[in-house]
């Protein structure tokens, strides 16, 4: 079967677009061919800075002939019905067939769609793909109407089989498909013809072009690592940079240089970020000291002087870039030493966080108060947590973070140490943003945890207070990420945090700020209102600052903000379901435990969910749930029919069958064991005690008729079912389990 080779040869494609472009080319072409009736065995897509390539093996040579039969109106139907049928089929009356049907004769249309040759289909599909290719940005050039990411120079479109190869006839805006391509722009620019993919790949390699981006990345990493190793140094791993650089060159040549002594005192992250962002250099560190001492740049060609000229030019530019970084570092250090870290952050009073939530300084004040509230619950000293909260955002006003925003937090930790602040405060500067993503490490140091929680809770409560919630796929303020960060901080550190109170306190702080700014008149004294949330008076005074006027009870709920914290708890529960689903816990299991008291204690919720999930995977667990559901269904129907609630009064003296008496005894034992186990949060023991009910409940339903003729016996048995329901529901709301 034929092999199809496509190459779209252009000016340099941005590295960040190449991966998606490969995938899109493969999908769009293969989908189009399959839709047109062709089949293929396998497909591979490749890219270099100047070309997108697709190769299909086992492509069918033509599409099949299709035959369709369509039933029409009755022969005796009105003429207009027949005319409509003819229009829909594109046939004439003499092309229809009369066939017998159970209601008489009807018209049938038999339509054949002949197959088409592969070259015709390929040309049609490829032209459509090229004209409608989904580049994030594209351009027109010359006088043509074609748009491409950069000017498209040539199209190679070749069908080959055992008999040879043929060019697929295709012309787009003056570009005619052929069987030729060109090699490396500098080292082998001449054009050459190819006969198939194997010939194409071999000739490209000879022309100094490495087609596969994964192979280029492997070459870069191997050569760069070897250069570093030869100097007793170590290459700093950066997969994102590696993939980007692999998309910048067709023939990678690694070159290593040394960083001048004048810059070696800079923090390693500063050197690494400056070289990566400005020049796409890999950092090389001394494994003994961790200090960045060298760099690796990747050239796109071999040179007669083995890269000496390239390195010389790069070092000149690097020196200028690192001089800027040194200036920023020294400027920031002078500021910290003269004014302290709080002095550096003083200007945040003039930086707006959000027009409805005030400045960054106003936000820091709220975070400080909340960190003080949270600190005792995470084992941190409130004063130390408050001190950390006051300075963790200060580096946002530093020159270094102004140049490299991705270093925020990290630079704060350096400046905190230079200012003589405790290590715990410095660590909080660096760690309070974490975790940002699902793979980020979670902080464990108490002060950092307190500030990280306060930061994220203030963000969530603030935006909830002004009704700026995520909608659908839109989440401009990354509130889902903030909620997941809170969840991971709580669970990873096994914290018992009364989240409802802390969210309510956060909402209170934001609403106070909003109320003051809006000039609201007092309803209740804010301190008496704060007592509802167990707010610490010292923290409250810190939060209020110089404000002495009475501030409205957060019956700012007049503005439609009713139950803000309750709504936010629901949002956390939704995020928790997503998080636990990835951990293998079903959503209905989570719903069952969320319905229990204490659902704002996420650590408690997860412990319950894990125990219930493990229980349901056992045979006893599955069978007991079915027994519970049977009891609940019978009881619910009887209560609806009789108009009464069977919730107490079951007495063993009215038991008739042995199985009934056995169940009474089992329920007594379960009640006695479950209560202390649940109180001690020993959910494994509670589930084990629940499992013991499986056999007596099964035996009871097998041997006993619930709706006995004797009314007293019937009522007693229904009350016994109520005991089953109550005991089972004391562990989780099992009615929410599916199946």
Image (cartoon, rainbow, N blue to C red):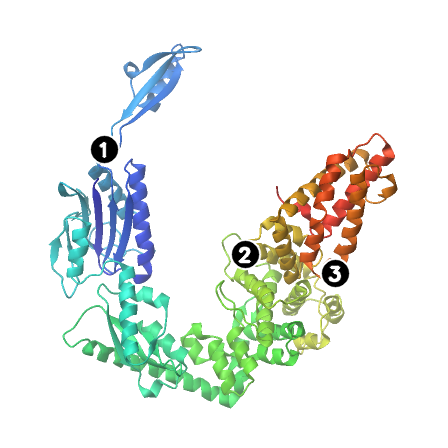
180 left or right, relative to 522: left
Between marks 3 and 1 in the image, the one whose residue lies nearer the viewer: 3
* Residue annotated with mark 2: 583
* Residue annotated with mark 3: 679
Say which label, 2 or 3, has the lower sequence index. 2
Q: Dot 3: what SS?
A: helix
Q: In this picture, is 35 found above or below 278?
A: above
Q: Dot 1: what SS?
A: loop
Give neighbour class at mark 3: few <14, some 14-19, many 20+ (Cα, 10 Å). few
Alpha carbon of mark 2 to alpha carbon of mark 3: how far?
26 Å
The numbered disc on residue 116 is: 1
Alpha carbon of mark 3 to alpha carbon of mark 1: how far?
75 Å
Alpha carbon of mark 1 to alpha carbon of mark 2: how far?
51 Å
Give neighbour class at mark 2: few <14, some 14-19, many 20+ (Cα, 10 Å). few
Q: Dot 2: what SS?
A: loop
Say how many tags the image has: 3
Q: Nearer the viewer, residue 457 or 287?
A: 287
Q: Nearer the viewer, residue 538 or 420?
A: 420
Say which label, 3 or 1, has the lower sequence index. 1
**Where's residue 618, x and y in %?**
62, 48
The numbered disc on residue 509 is: none
Q: Quadrant of the N terminus?
A: top left
Q: Is residue 561 visible to the viewer in this orientation of the structure?
A: no
Q: Is residue 314 visible to the viewer in this orientation of the structure?
A: yes
**Where's residue 122, x and y in %?**
23, 41
Q: In this picture, is 296 found above or below 111?
A: below
Point 26% across, 33% down: residue:
63
Point 85% across, 43% down: residue:
652
Q: In this picture, is 344 found above or below 572?
A: below
Say which label, 1 or 2, has the lower sequence index. 1
């Amino acid at each position: 079967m034929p092999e199809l080779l496509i190459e779209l040869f252009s000016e340099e494609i941005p590295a960040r677009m190449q991966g998606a472009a490969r995938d899109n080319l493969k999908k769009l072409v293969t989908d189009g061919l399959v839709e047109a009736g062709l089949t293929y065995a396998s497909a591979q897509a490749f890219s270099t800075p100047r070309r997108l390539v697709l190769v299909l093996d086992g492509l069918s040579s033509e599409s099949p002939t299709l035959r369709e039969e369509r039933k029409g109106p009755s022969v005796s139907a009105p003429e207009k019905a027949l005319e409509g049928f003819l229009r829909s089929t594109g046939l004439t009356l003499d092309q229809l067939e009369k066939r017998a049907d159970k209601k008489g004769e009807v018209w049938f249309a038999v339509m054949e769609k002949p197959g088409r040759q592969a070259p015709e289909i390929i040309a049609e599909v490829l032209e459509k793909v090229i004209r409608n290719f989904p580049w994030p940005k594209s351009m027109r050039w010359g006088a043509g109407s074609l748009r491409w990411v950069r000017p498209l120079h040539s199209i190679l479109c070749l069908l080959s089989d055992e008999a040879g190869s043929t060019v697929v006839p295709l012309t787009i805006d003056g570009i005619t498909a052929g069987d030729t391509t060109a090699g490396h722009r500098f080292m082998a620019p001449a054009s050459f013809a190819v006969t198939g993919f194997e010939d194409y790949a071999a000739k490209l390699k000879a022309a100094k072009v490495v087609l596969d981006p994964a192979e280029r990345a492997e070459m870069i990493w191997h050569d760069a690592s070897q250069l570093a190793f030869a100097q007793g140094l170590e290459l700093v791993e950066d997969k994102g940079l590696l993939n980007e650089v692999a998309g910048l060159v067709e023939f990678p040549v690694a070159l290593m240089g040394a960083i001048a002594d004048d810059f070696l005192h800079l923090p390693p992250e500063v050197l690494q970020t400056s070289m990566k962002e400005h020049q796409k250099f890999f950092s090389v560190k001394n494994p003994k000291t961790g200090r960045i001492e060298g760099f690796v740049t990747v050239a796109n060609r071999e040179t007669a002087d083995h890269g000496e000229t390239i390195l010389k030019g790069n070092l000149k530019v690097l020196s200028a870039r690192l001089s800027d970084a040194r200036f920023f570092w020294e400027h920031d250090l002078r500021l910290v030493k003269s004014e302290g870290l709080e002095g550096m952050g003083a200007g945040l009073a003039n930086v707006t966080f959000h027009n409805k939530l005030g400045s960054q300084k106003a936000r820091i004040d709220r975070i400080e108060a909340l960190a003080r509230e949270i600190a005792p619950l995470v084992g941190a000293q409130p004063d130390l947590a408050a001190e950390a909260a006051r300075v963790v955002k200060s580096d946002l006003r530093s020159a270094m973070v102004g140049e490299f925003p991705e270093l925020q937090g990290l630079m704060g930790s350096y400046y905190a140490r230079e200012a003589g602040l405790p290590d715990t405060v410095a660590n909080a500067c660096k760690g309070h943003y974490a975790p940002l993503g699902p793979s980020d490490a979670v902080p464990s140091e108490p002060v950092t945890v307190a500030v990280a929680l306060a930061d994220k809770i203030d963000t969530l409560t603030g935006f909830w207070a002004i009704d700026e919630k995520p909608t659908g796929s839109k989440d401009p303020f990354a509130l889902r990420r903030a909620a997941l960060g809170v969840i991971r901080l709580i669970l990873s550190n096994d914290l018992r945090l009364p989240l409802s109170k802390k969210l309510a306190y956060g909402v209170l702080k934001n609403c106070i700020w909003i109320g003051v700014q809006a000039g609201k008149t007092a309803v209740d004294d804010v301190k008496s209102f704060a007592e509802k949330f167990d707010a610490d008076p010292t923290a409250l005074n810190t939060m209020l600052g110089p404000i002495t006027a009475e501030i409205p009870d957060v019956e700012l709920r007049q503005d439609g903000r009713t139950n803000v914290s309750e709504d936010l708890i629901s949002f956390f529960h939704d995020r928790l379901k997503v998080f636990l689903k990835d951990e293998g816990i079903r959503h209905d299991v989570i719903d069952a435990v969320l319905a229990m008291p204490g659902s704002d204690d996420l650590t408690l919720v997860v412990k319950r969910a894990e125990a219930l999930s493990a229980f349901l995977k056992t045979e006893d667990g599955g069978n007991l749930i079915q027994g519970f559901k049977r009891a609940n269904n019978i009881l619910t129907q009887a209560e609806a029919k009789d108009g009464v609630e069977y919730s107490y009064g079951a007495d063993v003296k009215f038991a008739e069958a042995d199985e009934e008496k056995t169940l009474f005894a089992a329920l007594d034992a379960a009640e006695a064991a479950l209560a202390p186990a649940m109180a001690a949060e020993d959910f494994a023991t509670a589930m084990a005690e629940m499992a013991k009910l499986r056999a007596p409940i099964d035996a009871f339903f097998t041997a006993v008729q619930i709706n006995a003729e004797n009314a007293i016996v019937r009522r007693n048995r229904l009350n016994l079912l109520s005991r089953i329901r109550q005991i089972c529901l004391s562990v989780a709301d099992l009615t929410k389990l599916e199946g």
